[in-house]
Amino acid sequence: MAFLGRLKLWNMKVGFLIGGGLLFTGVLLQVVLGPIRWELFAWPVNLIVLILLLAAIGIMFVLRRKVYAFEWMMHAGAAVPCLVYAAALTMIMGLTPQVRMGGVPWLSQMLRFWPFVLIWTWMMIISALAALNHLLRWKVKEIPFILNHLGVVVAIVSATLGSADTQSLRLTSFTGEPEWRAVDESGALHEPGLTIELHKFTLEEYDDGTPKRFASDITVYTADGKTVRGTVEVNKPLKVNGWKIYQYGYDVKSGAESPYSTFQLVCDPWILWVYIGIFMMIAGALCLMLFMAPKPIRE
């Protein structure tokens, strides 16, 4: 009864106040420190942060009977307000074009927006504690909740801390001239361990002269001795050694006679874990519908 009494004191109003406090704190951090610089969390810093975060969650779970706030975080009073804030910010993100430069101040770079990250970190901690709570009282009917909560944790951690290891480079290769040097957005030179040789550039146009399809026949040589030949088109990348090679551009003035192709090279080593987290959430939702399906009435 004492526990129920404390639950009434720590209700959803407290959850909304905490969420509002995180938003206010996030805005202050955005003004004082500027956008979050995820590049500072590149490997192995992101691994260290992840270990410390998981350790903190474990300590919170162990102390849940002594520190009521930790116990409260596993209940609807904390989860529902956090979900409302997270859904609202995500909706804003979906309605605002996300660009690396320009756009709507703050809102066009939501993954670098402190309020957005703080709210979703709060959501991740709540989900992790709830998952541990369901695991502790293991029953088959707990599977949907465990999958949902763990899926949220895996997806959020992978999408945020993993973004620091994502590389996006541009490489320009002239026909018959293998190229191994690429540049990032700042113009810094990189050697991604791939050499691209352009064999032929193809351009198809509509009757009005606008591009219909442009593609490049290339061979990719890797630092570990692989040779991969393929055709790269817009939205149809060639995958080699963890890199996705996209057709990015060509010499517009020369058209079909373009002497070169520009490729975008993208490497995201954490993307698999993002997909795993999303799959877990989908599997949890399907299991929940299965468990909640009405049982046939026996005559």
Image (spheres, grey):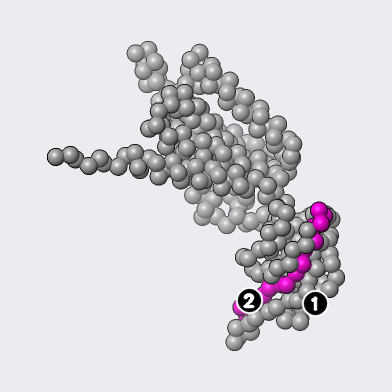
Residue at (34% x, 13% y) in the render: 1
Alpha carbons under labels 2 and 1: distance apart:
17 Å
The local crowd at label 2, few if under 14, some if 14 to 19, many if 20 or more residues have their Cα within 10 Å, is few
| Residue 184 part of the magenta segment | no
Q: Which residue, as the protein is rendered here, is positioned at the far left?
A: 299
Q: Is residue 217 above or below residue 206?
A: above
Look at label 1 and name its amino acid: Pro
Q: The magenta stretch spans which residues?
A: 210-225
Q: Residue 69: tell me if it is visible.
A: no
Q: Which residue is identified by label 2?
A: 213
Tell me which secondary structure the magenta stretch mostly adopts. strand
Q: Position of residue 13 (x, y in %)?
A: 42, 29
The front one of 193 and 212 is 193
From the viewer's perspective, is 34 left or right of 151? right
Residue at (60% x, 55% y) in the render: 98
Q: Position of residue 272 (x, y in %)?
A: 61, 47
Q: Position of residue 155 (x, y in %)?
A: 56, 42
Residue at (61% x, 24% y) in the render: 56
Comes first in the chain, label 2 or label 1 = 2
**Dot 1: what SS?**
loop
From the viewer's perspective, is 171 left or right of 82? right
Look at label 2 and name its amino acid: Arg
Q: Is residue 124 above or below residue 241?
A: above
Q: Is residue 294 above or below residue 94?
A: above
